[in-house]
Amino acid sequence: MAALILPTDWIKNWEKSGKNDFLQLCRDLAGKADEEVFLKDLQMALYELCWHVVHGGLKVDVAASLLADVMELREEMPSILADVFCVLDIETGCLEEKHKRDHFIQLVGACLCCVSEAVLKERLDPDTLESLGLIKQAQQFNQKIVKIKTKLFYKQQKFNLLREENEGYAKLVTELGQDLSGNVTSHLVLESIKSLIGCFNLDPNRVLDIILEVYECRSDQDEFFIPLIKSYMCEHQTLCHILGFKFKFHQEPNGETPSSLYHVAAALLQHHLIALEDLYVHLLPLDSSIVEEHKREILEAKQIARKLTMVVVPSEKSDDKEKEKDKEEEKNEKPPNNQKLGLLEALLQIGDWQHAQSIMEQMPPFYATSHKSIAVALCQLLHLILEPLYRRAAVPKGAKGCVLNLLRNRQAPGLVESFEDLRKDVFTMLGYLGPHLSHDPILFAKIVRLGKSFMKEYHSESKQDAKEKMDTLLSCFLSIADQVLLPSLTLMDCNACMSEEIWGFFKLFPYHHRYRLYGQWKNETYSSHPLLVKVKAQTVDRAKYIMK
């Protein structure tokens, strides 16, 4: 690049040889085959020439006449010179010497015949354009630029589409709301939707939004709407964003998200039309808020336990009870709009255990199942999964049980046909339930009866290989007895039948296993769950009252 800097001799002897030497240099550069090298070198040469003019080394009219000759070398020369002017415009605008800025303005003014006004308006600063007389006022020009950019890049082109295309959207709603009991298929409806989009110029994203709205109103038609959405929408992110906006609409302080929206989201997740991690960020409350709530519950439980060791005056005691009662009433009066738990419940109801488990893993232990609706939904799913094995191995003689309608979707967990199948999902589900199995005494009895049936098979098995496999299942049943059955028995209302059932199961355990379960129940279990701490405190308090 040093060779391109104009030698001092060229400037001193400009009229004699310098002008011709510079013109010849530009011709040589214009003839280069390499466009990148040509552009870079020529820009540098023109910059050096203009730099000498700005600093007073060359007269403006002399440089302008030479630049006019250079402009004829190639078509893109005016644009290259405009780029050079753009750089010098910035540089001279920062200089304190006013005369240099004046030289630059004079040079550009003399070259207006070489570079068009439109190109200069693109490259130069509005103040410079005002000095050149190309615009009237720089401020007015800036305002015009802002308006044009806003119109081009920020102004919404499509708005209020339902009013603009009444007939098209009306036909769309009619098409989606028709009776689906005949030969109507999602493929036929999709073809009609495509015709409506083309005929009435409908916005595809708004059409998708209306499809989801109708699906929400007809949430029992999964077999029709899931294939329709799958065929219509190939971009999962767009579908997820529209669904996320629907959830955000119900996130007002007193808002309540409808169960139909939870069902639609759960069905789309189950069929992998959206990803859980993409939808999860749109839901409230935040995970940090859930953790804080869980910590508060633990702290409240510890405070209740601490009160057991304190001597309380009867009047103060009654006041504390009234305060606790008021707190419980407030919790019951204002149930939080927890969208994550609502989605979790919908996933469990349709049998999507994989996504339901992923949500529960994001939360503190037993937080989700501490809400009755979640625990009941998980218990119902367990009923359906256990039905074949329970009918085969655990129904008491002479008992008549109601027949359950099994889940029809293919994505639901597999049914349990043997004790070995319990290891796939059932033990994991029971682990998430923990002490909240107490909400369903019937399922509690089924688990206990399955345990009794297994223990009978375990004691009667003589083959060593089968015995080793059953040892693994035995350890699983022991864990379930420790983490689920005994804590749930504590939370149940007084039920002598359940106590008899669980004793019939426990008496089949070896002596040392049984008493280890009793020891852990007494010394560890009560301190591991806030609800168990409260129940123990209430029981002790009631016992003290009776023994007065």
Image (cartoon, grey):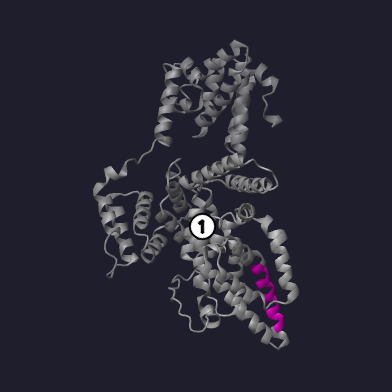
**Snapshot quadrant of residue 92:** top right
Residue range of the region highlighted in magenta in the rendering: 467-481
Q: Amino acid at mark 1?
A: Lys
Give the percent coordinates (x, y) of residue 273.
47, 59
Q: Nearer the viewer, residue 389 or 304?
A: 304
Residue 279 magenta: no
Residue 134 visible in rendering: no
Q: Which quarter of the rendering shows the N terminus?
A: top right
Outermost residue to the right: 512
Q: Nearer the viewer, residue 20 or 269?
A: 269
Total numbered circles: 1
The answer to whether 462 is drawn above or below residue 354 in the figure is below
Magenta stretch: helix, strand or loop mostly: helix
Residue for badge 1 = 372
Query: 213 left or right of 265?
Result: left
Outermost residue to the bottom: 462
Outermost residue to the front: 548
Residue 333 visible in rendering: yes
Give the percent coordinates (x, y) of residue 88.
58, 22
